Image (cartoon, rainbow, N blue to C red):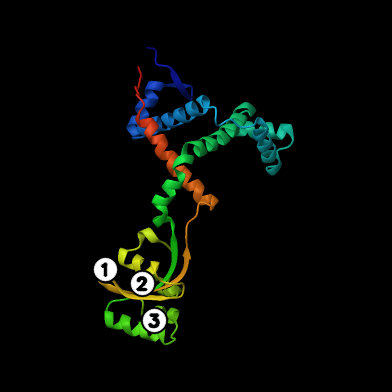
Amino acid sequence: MKDLSFLTVDDQVISIGQAVKYLQASGKLGQFIGDILRQHVMEEEIRNREDIEISPALTEQTIIDFRLKNELTEPQKFQEWLQSNGTDYATFYSSVAFGFKLERLKAVVTEAKLSEYFIERKIFLDRVVVSRIIVDNRELAEELQTQIEEGSSFGQLAREYSLADDRVVNGMMGPVSRGTMPDILRAAVDVALPGQLVGPIQLDGRYGLFRVEQFLPASLDDTQLKQALQNELFEKWLAEKIQKLTVKLQVS
C-alpha cells in the first residue's frame, strides 16, 4: 500500500505513516484516534437519524446574526474573515448546521434518562450556603456556641477563633454541595432552618460550629444545569458507542 502524503512542511512531504509515528512518539496517538472516532460516531448518528432535522432557515439566520455582531456584513470583508480562519462559506455553513444538529442529538438521546439521572445526582447538585467556626477542642466550641446563642456576632467570633482559612470572610464557606459534606454534618444541616446554628460537630479531630445561611436546591428548570446533565449523559452514551466499534489502524 502506498503511504499517502499528509502534510508538506518546507517542501518536505510528511506521509500519513510518518504522522502516525510522530503521534505515537508524543503519546498523543490514542487521543487523536479517539477524537476521530468521536466525530465519526456523531456524524453517523446525525446522518442516519430522522428525528434531528433542523430548518435551514435557522442556520442561515444564525450566520446573519454572526455577521452582524462581528461587523462582517460586507461580502468582501466576510470572505476575508473566512480565508483568515482557513475555511470557506460551505464549510462554515456546515459547521453551524452541525452544531444545531448535535444539540438536537444530545436532547434526543438523553431525554428518556434525564429525569432519572437528575434524581441520582441530586444530592451532589443541591447546595447549601454555610458559615463555620473550626476550633481544636470541644470546650471552646461549646463556649462559642453559648456566646452566639446569647447574641454575639458569629462573624466576629469566626475571625477571632476559627482555624479555617475562611475566617477572614467571617467563616463564610459559600455554596457547598450536599453530597460532599461529611454524613454527620449533612444530616444535621438537612434538618436545620436558615439562620440556625448547628454543632459542635467533631470532624477530623477538630470541632465545628456551622450556621446555615441558605438552601440552594437543584432543579431541571435551571437551563445551565439541565444542559450540563445532558452533556454528561451524552458523553456516557458516546463512550458506549465507541467501545462497541471494531477499529483497525491501517498504515503502511
Q: Helix or strand or loop: what does disc 3 sit on?
A: helix
Does 18 sit above or below residue 28? above
Judging by the rendered image, the residue that carries numbered circle 2 is 164
Question: Closest to the observer: 151 or 17?
Answer: 151
Judging by the rendered image, the residue that carries numbered circle 3 is 160
Q: Residues within 10 Å of mark 3 (few under 14, many from 20)?
A: few
Q: What's the residue type where badge 3 is placed?
A: Glu
Left or right: 38, with 60 as reference point:
left
Give the quarter of the image for residue 152: bottom left
Q: What's the residue type where badge 1 is placed?
A: Asp
Which residue corresponds to the image point at 33% horizontal and 32% vertical from the top-left? 25
Sequence-earlier tag: 2 or 1: 2
Q: Helix or strand or loop: what does disc 1 sit on?
A: loop
Give the quarter of the image for residue 122: bottom left
Does 179 sit above or below residue 76? below
- Image marks 2 and 1: residues in contact by CB distance under 8 Å: no
Question: Closest to the observer: 143 or 51?
Answer: 51
In percent of width and height, residue 132 lies at 39, 73
Point out the frontmost of discs 3 and 1: 1
Which residue corresponds to the image point at 69% horizontal and 36% vertical from the top-left? 61
Disc sitting over residue 204 in the figure: 1
Q: Residues within 10 Å of mark 1 (few under 14, many from 20)?
A: few
Question: Closest to the observer: 245 or 220?
Answer: 220
Q: Residues within 10 Å of mark 2 (few under 14, many from 20)?
A: some
Left or right: 241, with 67 as reference point:
left
Which residue corresponds to the image point at 37% horizontal and 58% vertical from the top-left? 179
Which residue corresponds to the image point at 47% horizontal and 65% vertical from the top-left? 215
Instruction: Using the numbered discs, state the Cα–Cα distance from disc 3 to disc 2 in whole angstroms.
Output: 11 Å
Point out the frontmost of discs 2 and 1: 1
